[in-house]
Amino acid sequence: MKITTQLRRIIQYIIIPALVIPLWGMAMGDVSAAPSTNAQAAALIDVESGRILFSTRGDEELPIASLTKIMTAIVAIEYGTLSDRVKVSKRAYGKEGSSIYLHLGEEMSLENLLYGLMLRSGNDAATAIAEHVGGSEEGFVLLMNKKAEMLGLEHTQFQNPHGLDAKGHYSSANDLAKLTAYAMHNPVFKEIVRTPSRTAPNPNDPWDYKWDNKNKMLRLYEGADGVKTGYTKIARRCLVSSATRNDQQLVAVTINDGDDWNDHRKLLDYGFEHYPQQTLIKAGQAVQNGLKAGITFSYPLSAEEAKKVEFRLKEQVSGSRLFGYRGEILIRLGDQEIGVVPVYDARGIVGDG
């Protein structure tokens, strides 16, 4: 049946209160009890949604020490080849600061260098990786800054791949949270930062390299699975940690925090307690008019927010209905759209209307 031009312009918005009911009355803590930290700046983010759950001075541009290596690692993973053999140059061999003690002229796989980079914070590894993947350290830094721009990190600028203090080298707690949430979607990055210990072939000595992860959160916090420590005399103690509980992964960031292990425990506890992942719509869930939701959608919400979630059906009454597509559910929290779920004809595939 042909649809008239007038009908093609009709869009129906229907509030679906039934979808809100399961969230009412859920017992969660007082969201007003936000954690206090000793950090100069801090942030907490839900990895799946990218929602920042807590932030204090989150956009302040600060030196970040070896938290820089989060960007180094994800750029190297995305642009490099893990099996490549990387030769250690004089510049990499002589790099000051924390080291995995590579030998001049030594060759190591990019994959093993990434473990040395993230577990032991090797500045020599960072330089060797940068020179190999970027053609030079300067070329790699260009890739880092391009990636920051692509991710919308407006308070971030890199001057090197290792994080040694340099003028114009900075980021913010919020930007680091967003960067880490992005990186945690990469399975290689995710596996590296959760690894407690790693061995690698050593061509110069009769024993293998063995790197134990500096990140004490892996041992101190239930469900911890990353990410990176950092320290310089100017940046002071910096830490990005992550943990997963009940299929929800959170990332905490602190910059210049003398009590970071305890503060990260408080931040992560706060997030899991006050902003648990809520399944708002399940794939196959009946909506109305013979329609069903096409995907499952979850979002971290406080108890008060859960009461305010609003669902509106934007039903397509004309145009292509290939594979039964009939429109979408718009999910809003206040004046913010937090998700879109496609809906389909429950009877299955229909023709192109």
Image: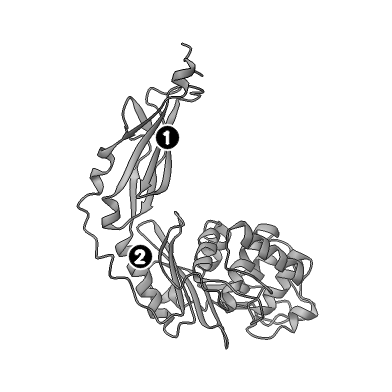
In the rendered structure, the answer to whether residue 60 lies left or right of residue 292 reads right
In this view of the protein, which residue sits in the foreground, 119 or 38? Answer: 38
In this view of the protein, which residue sits in the foreground, 239 or 132? Answer: 239
Q: Label 1 belongs to which residue?
A: 328
The tag on residue 185 is none
- Which residue is rendered at x = 51% and y = 62% of the image? 178
- Image spot of residue 40 (x, y percent): 46, 80
- Image spot of residue 66 (x, y percent): 59, 77
Q: Quadrant of residue 127?
A: bottom right
Asked if residue 53 is positioned above or below residue 20 in the image, the reply reads below
Asked if residue 309 is positioned above or below residue 131 in the image, the reply reads above
- Which residue is rendered at x = 78% and y = 69% of the image? 136
Gap between marks 2 and 1 measured at Cα: 30 Å
Q: Label 2 belongs to which residue?
A: 271
Query: From this viewpoint, is residue 344 visible?
Result: yes
Q: Earlier in the sequence, mark 2 or mark 1?
A: 2
In this view of the protein, which residue sits in the foreground, 223 or 298? Answer: 298
In the rendered structure, the answer to whether residue 180 lies left or right of residue 205 reads left
